[in-house]
Image: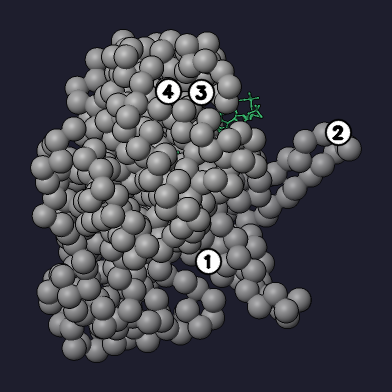
């Protein structure tokens, strides 16, 4: 492995990532993730624990058919069992059966583990490490040696920790990976110990960190600064307990903030958000809004003064340009907004002729603050804020007029399903419309009735559906007077938009949000048609 300014990215999403609570990859998902990682440009893909289960073993067979462009596939396992000849050790033989270019084995560094977990002697553990590395080398493998609990072991007995690395080196290991298995180390310790190992060993050094002290990425970055040339981690940082080092942040930090490189094609960084979303989808995990670099909030500006700064000089409040990692800037509207937030929204609406100091901008701010005080929130209901702007600017028109609605929910027997039905009376362009809708719940039924009523007049909203529905109870301590806030996300398949409604009655709050959502789409359709 060449160490010249290159940091090798070793991805263990499919192995240590799969050790996260709530994560299981299907065989198809494993292949999808591996292909995506390869296109992104990671150097190693650890596909699973060879001796663990048939699914992991099948992955090694299936991935061979995929002809990866760049990444090497690694099979993971442990040193041989104590007092077992390596050529008879089931785990080691499973590594050979995986038939990968690279084999990664973990071995014990910490005497506590040697005597209390393996229940063997320090000498036998050293023999286990050396034998297994040598056997795999003799079988033509590139061998990555993961020194489990390296930092804890080193703090307990530096002498034995060094002997364990010497055993791996004698066995021919190509990389010595220092593992902070329990995730308890701090960056300065990782720097010092990595630097020391780099000095003592003429073999490439790698780093594998866990996030139990919330320092996994910082620890990996410090190890790299001290000379580590391989970083092991997981896309999005999930993994055993609190997770592994997040490779999303490592790839971005190494590429943009150090003089080192880690991606063959640094332009791939523009696919960082895409990669993050894809891996979460395959792992069936929700996206973390606040994730560094790739989260929806990573470049979302809320405070008025920040928005003012970003509008003047983008890097005044952004550490890297959002587009460099495939993300985008968002301006949020809330009671903490100032004129700059409003100006950004006006621009998004194509209204570029309104002065920042104009009375209209002040009135928009004051109306919004008054509404927020009574329970509305606009930071997650951008379309409602745009409707509010139209109302203040007297550019709003009602596409229809409500004459009334009735919603019923009926359960005809213990084992019968709940039926929701809504009947709705509207006037559109002076013409009366009366419709009935059924749905999975009362709001869905109301939504169906509304779309049916409008179909004849505005067929452009036919494809719009409810994508998400969230309810919050405001002032719950005032039991009967509690208000309900409903946020609805509507979608037409290509884009989505959110609206808000507030009332003491949940159906009325939902109706208000529905109306904003429909009107927003009708305005957009009109603008497109002009
Ligand atoms: C830090 C890490 O994340 S390392 C990766 C850990 N990952 C996993 O454990 C997931 C996959 N594991 C598995 O599917 C199973 O544990 C298997 C198939 C590997 C082993 O299953 P079992 O044989 O039933 O053993 P079990 O899991 O209970 O116990 C571990 C055994 O491995 C031994 N062991 C643990 N670490 C090592 C090591 N580095 N080298 C050799 N043996 C080891 C233990 O001493 C224990 O041996 P014993 O049965 O003689 O007491
Ligand atoms: C090898 C590994 O996963 C660890 O030490 O955490």
Mark whose residue sits in front, 2 or 3? 3
Answer yes or no: disc 3 within 8 Å of ligand 1. Answer: yes
Residue farthest to the right, as pictured: 414
- From the top left corner, tell me how far across and down residue 83 is, in percent: 58, 22
Compare marks 1 and 4 and give the one earlier in the sequence.
Answer: 4
Residue 140, located in which quarter of the rendered image? top left
Q: Are marks 1 and 3 in contact (CB under 8 Å)?
A: no
Tell me, yes or no, if residue 87 can be seen here. Answer: yes
Q: Quadrant of ligand 1?
A: top right
**CA distance for labels 2 and 1:** 34 Å
Determine whether the residue tagged by mark 4 lies in a helix, strand or loop.
helix
Disc number placed over residue 132 in the picture, else none: 4
Residue 431 left/right relative to 271 = right
- From the top left corner, tell me how far across and down residue 305 is, in percent: 26, 83
- The N terminus, quarter of image: top left
Q: Are marks 1 and 4 in contact (CB under 8 Å)?
A: no
Q: Are marks 3 and 4 in contact (CB under 8 Å)?
A: yes
Determine whether the residue tagged by mark 3 lies in a helix, strand or loop.
loop
The residue shown at (68%, 52%) is 407
- Mark 4 Cα-neighbour bin, 10 Å: few <14, some 14–19, many ≥20: many
Instruction: Work out whether 118 lies above or below 313.
Output: above
Between residue 131 and residue 216, name the one nearer to us.
131
Please give the residue where the numbered disc 2 appears in the rendered image: 415
Instruction: Work out whether 519 lies above or below 111.
Output: below
**CA distance for labels 1 and 4:** 65 Å
Q: Are marks 4 and 2 in contact (CB under 8 Å)?
A: no
């Amino acid at each position: 492995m060449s160490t010249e300014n290159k940091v090798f990215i070793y991805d263990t999403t499919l192995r240590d990532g799969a050790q996260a609570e709530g994560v299981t990859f299907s065989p198809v998902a494993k292949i999808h993730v591996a292909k995506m990682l390869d296109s992104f440009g990671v150097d190693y893909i650890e596909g699973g624990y060879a001796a663990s289960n048939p699914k992991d073993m099948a992955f090694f067979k299936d991935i061979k058919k995929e002809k990866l462009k760049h990444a090497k596939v690694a099979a993971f396992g442990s040193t041989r069992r104590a007092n077992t000849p390596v050529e008879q050790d089931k785990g080691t033989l499973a590594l050979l059966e995986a038939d990968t270019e690279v084999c990664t084995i973990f071995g014990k560094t910490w005497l506590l583990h040697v005597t209390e977990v393996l229940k063997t002697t320090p000498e036998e553990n050293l023999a286990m490490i050396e034998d297994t590395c040598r056997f795999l080398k003799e079988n033509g493998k590139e061998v990555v040696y993961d020194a489990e609990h390296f930092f804890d072991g080193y703090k307990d007995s530096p002498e034995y920790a060094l002997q364990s690395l010497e055993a791996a080196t004698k066995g021919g290991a190509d990389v010595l990976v220092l593992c902070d298995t329990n995730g308890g180390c701090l960056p300065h310790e990782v720097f010092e110990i990595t630097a020391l190992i780099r000095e003592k060993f003429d073999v490439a050094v790698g780093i594998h960190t866990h996030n139990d002290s919330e320092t996994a990425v910082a620890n990996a970055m410090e190890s790299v600064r001290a000379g580590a040339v391989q970083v092991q981690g997981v896309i999005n940082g999930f993994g055993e307990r609190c997770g592994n080092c997040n490779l999303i942040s490592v790839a971005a930090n190494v590429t943009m903030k150090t003089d080192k490189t880690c991606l063959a094609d640094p332009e791939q960084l523009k696919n960082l958000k895409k990669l993050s979303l894809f891996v979460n989808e395959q792992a069936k995990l929700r996206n973390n809004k606040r994730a560094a670099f790739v989260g929806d909030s990573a470049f979302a500006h809320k405070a008025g003064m920040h928005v003012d700064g970003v509008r003047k000089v983008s890097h005044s409040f952004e550490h890297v340009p959002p587009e460099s990692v495939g993300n985008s800037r968002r301006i949020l509207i809330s009671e903490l907004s100032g004129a700059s937030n409003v100006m950004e929204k006006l621009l998004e609406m194509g209204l570029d002729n309104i002065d920042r100091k104009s009375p209209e901008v002040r009135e928009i701010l004051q109306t919004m603050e008054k509404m927020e005080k009574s329970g509305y929130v606009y930071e997650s209901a951008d379309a409602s804020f745009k409707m509010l702007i139209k109302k203040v600017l007297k550019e709003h028109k009602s596409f229809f007029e409500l004459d009334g609605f009735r919603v019923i929910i009926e359960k005809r027997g213990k084992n019968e399903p709940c039926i929701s039905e809504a009947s709705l009376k509207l006037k559109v362009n002076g013409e009366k419309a009366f419709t009935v809708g059924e749905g999975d719940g009362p709001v869905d039924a109301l939504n169906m009735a509304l779309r049916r009523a409008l179909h004849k007049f505005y067929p452009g909203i036919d494809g719009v559906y409810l994508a998400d529905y969230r309810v919050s109870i405001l002032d719950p301590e005032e039991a009967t007077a509690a208000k309900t806030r409903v946020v609805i996300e509507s979608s037409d398949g290509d884009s989505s938009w959110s609206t808000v409604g507030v009332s003491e009655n949940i159906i009325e709050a939902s109706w208000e949000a529905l109306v904003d959502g429909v009107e927003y789409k009708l305005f957009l359709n009109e603008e497109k048609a002009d």
